[in-house]
Image (cartoon, helix red, strand yellow):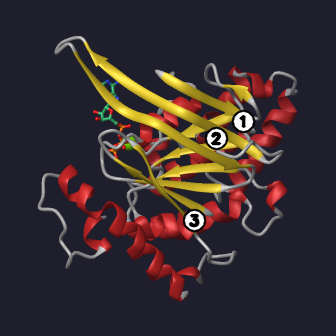
Amino acid sequence: MTPPTADTKLRLTGVTKSFFTPRTGTNTLAVAEMNLDIQTGEFICIVGPSGCGKSTVLNMIAGLDQPSGGRIEKDGQGITGPGADRGVMFQDYALMPWQSVEDNVGFGLRHGTPGENMSTKQRQERVAHFIDLVGLKGSEHKYPHQLSGGMRQRVALARLLANGPDILLLDEPLGALDAQTRLILQAELLRIWGETSPVSERKTAIFITHDIEEAVLLADRVVVMSTHPGCVREVVTIDIPRPRAGHARTNPRFGVLVEHIWSLIRDEAFRAIGGATSAESASPETTH
Ligand SMILES: Nc1ncnc2c1ncn2[C@@H]1O[C@H](COP(=O)(O)OP(=O)(O)OP(=O)(O)O)[C@@H](O)[C@H]1O
Ligand SMILES: [Mg+2]
């Protein structure tokens, strides 16, 4: 690997993770010798067959799990545990059902380090700002059960952003949504990430998805992972100009990149779900 530059936000060097299962006495090598540099302000998507180690990698970057070998550095410092500088969002919203939208969004500010030096008024203003940013103004006093799936995921996004992380770690955050809501939230996500802002003002985002088109729409680079053990198969640069929302799918490169990424994971993806391999006639749409 090349030496880290001033813009290197995250560096994974020879990262390995094995899980020991006491019941069977076996070790599962989930991730092996993974190397990856991620630049400040980059939007990285990770795709790969089910079980290839995508969530395992994200959890280690979040500090929720430790590598068995190798090293993960953020801004040149080893990651030793979770921190408010890295915000994590999962597929299942993880909202607190007994709290209103504004209480959910403000949770980290009330209980964690990000809000420690803020007055109550400052916290309230920050919560209101992010509720507005994700398009939920007017729903502040609603509870999760009163919201649609798309609205709940907006709440989760606002909560993540309110804590002011500089890295967003997103594990299939749109995976549970219907197709139309998903398209809308993809565009929203690009806006909130800062697609129209200078790179220096963008957050660094790592986004896991099974949807190759979603990856090509969102990412600066798509990390394609192989399975057994999980490792980087290829890093594909998405050379489609930004802003992309609404336009990218009509760019001739879009289909070419989708097909290329699909060709990299096709056989393993079929094996992962127990199907036949190398189905030349299958299109990417049949997998999501
Ligand atoms: N806590 C654990 N204990 C034992 N094995 C685990 C554990 N977590 C993950 N694994 C194994 O590690 C491998 C990678 O799992 P991981 O959840 O990272 O895959 P993934 O790429 O996120 O899959 P999916 O696309 O289905 O979400 C799998 O073989 C999985 O069974
Ligand atoms: Mg996963």
Q: CA distance from mark 2 to mark 1?
A: 6 Å
Q: Are marks 3 and 1 in contact (CB under 8 Å)?
A: no
> Which residue: 30% across, 42% down?
51
Image mark for residue 270? none
Q: In the rendered image, which quarter contains the N terminus?
A: top right
What residue did someone put label 2 on? 160
| Image vertical order of residue 225 relative to residue 114, above or below | below
Q: CA distance from mark 3 to mark 1?
A: 23 Å
Identify the element where label 3 is drawn. Answer: helix
How many tags in the picture?
3
Identity of the amino acid at label 1?
Asn
Identity of the amino acid at label 3?
Leu
Q: Nearer the viewer, residue 91 or 256?
A: 256
Q: Is residue 216 left or right of residue 160?
A: left
Q: Nearer the viewer, residue 50 or 264?
A: 264
Place of residue 286 in the rendered image (x, y in percent of width and height, measured from the top left): 25, 71
Which image quadrant shows ligand 2? Answer: top left
Mark sitting earlier along the chain (2/3): 2
What residue did someone put label 3 on? 218
Mark sitting earlier along the chain (3/1): 1
What residue did someone put label 1 on? 163
Crowding around mark 3 (Cα neighbors within 10 Å: few <14, some 14 to 19, many 20+) is many
Q: Is mark 3 within 8 Å of ligand 1?
A: no
